[in-house]
Image: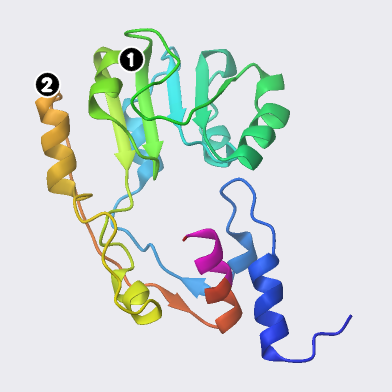
Amino acid sequence: MKLQNAREIWQAEEKHAFQGWDFSHLDGRWEGEDIPWDYKIILQTYLKSTDKLLDMGTGGGEFLLSLGHPYELTSVTEAYPRNVLLCKEKLAPLGITVEQVFDDAILPFENDGFDMIINRHEAFDAREIGRILKGGGHFVTQQVGGKNDMDLAMRLIDGLEPPFPQHTLENNVAALRAEHFEILRAEEVFTPIRFFDVGALVYFCKIIE
């Protein structure tokens, strides 16, 4: 059926399915996250082929698979039911361990189980990370802080109170140091985000509430 007006176009964008961690629907329709570091290069600086690796909040495993790490040494966690199903269909047959989790402070892994834990945008509990990470292991995380896109959110939501004001680089570093982590690198940046059509903004707001 041919869409008749802008409202129908925006409603269609709102209903468009989102799966894994795939933003290809927005290709050419937005720009943002122009960050000054390369998460993948940082990981590869420390990751060895013999490491037991955990990817927290893997989405659909798209980024994880790009690392080419041995499947039998790899585990993932994910909470979102649609993505859990996707991981079980795509990752588990490869030999990757897939675990659905609902509480960051309770992860279904043994003490000192991993040489490296990676986390891109997933919440974490510093004490639990310290429990399952081997001594001398590495935890690499790229978080979306509590002030992320706040200028956009405040334009869209009247009277908005930031829901996670404590989620800052400073506070996360302090939490990790309290668990005896040595901080090798800590950076923070705030970048603009631009949308080139209203439908792209509608889609983004639906999937990133």
Q: Which residue is drawn at 24% across and 28% down?
A: 126
Q: In which quarter of the image is residue 124?
A: top left
**Dot 1 lies on which element?**
helix
Q: Compared with residue 11, is residue 137 higher up or lower down, i.e. above or below? A: above
Q: Residue at x 31, y 26 (%)?
A: 46
Counting residues from the start of the chain, the first of labels 2 and 1 encountered is 1
Task: Please state which amino acid type lies under the numbered disc 1.
Answer: Ile
Magenta highlight on residue 197: no
**Residue placed farthest to the front in the image?**
159
Q: Compared with residue 111, is residue 93 higher up or lower down, i.e. above or below? A: below
| x and y, in percent, of residue 37 in the image | 30, 51
The disc placed on residue 180 is 2
Q: Quadrant of residue 139?
A: top left
**Residue placed farthest to the right in the image?**
1
Foreground residue among 189 and 123: 123
3D distance between C-alphas at marks 2 and 1: 14 Å
Q: Specify few, some or many for label 1: CA neighbours under 10 Å numbering under 14, 14-19, or 20 or more.
A: many
Drawn side of residue 1 relative to residue 105, left or right? right
The disc placed on residue 97 is none
Q: Specify few, some or many for label 2: CA neighbours under 10 Å numbering under 14, 14-19, or 20 or more.
A: few
Residue 165 visible in the shown view: yes
Foreground residue among 76 and 189: 76
Highlighted magenta segment, given as a residue range: 203-208
Task: Please state which amino acid type lies under the numbered disc 2.
Answer: His
Magenta span dominant secondary structure: helix
Task: Provide the residue designation for mark 1.
Answer: 132
Foreground residue among 120 and 79: 79
Q: Compared with residue 23, is residue 204 higher up or lower down, i.e. above or below? A: below
| x and y, in percent, of residue 101 in the image | 49, 28
Quadrant of the image containing the N terminus: bottom right
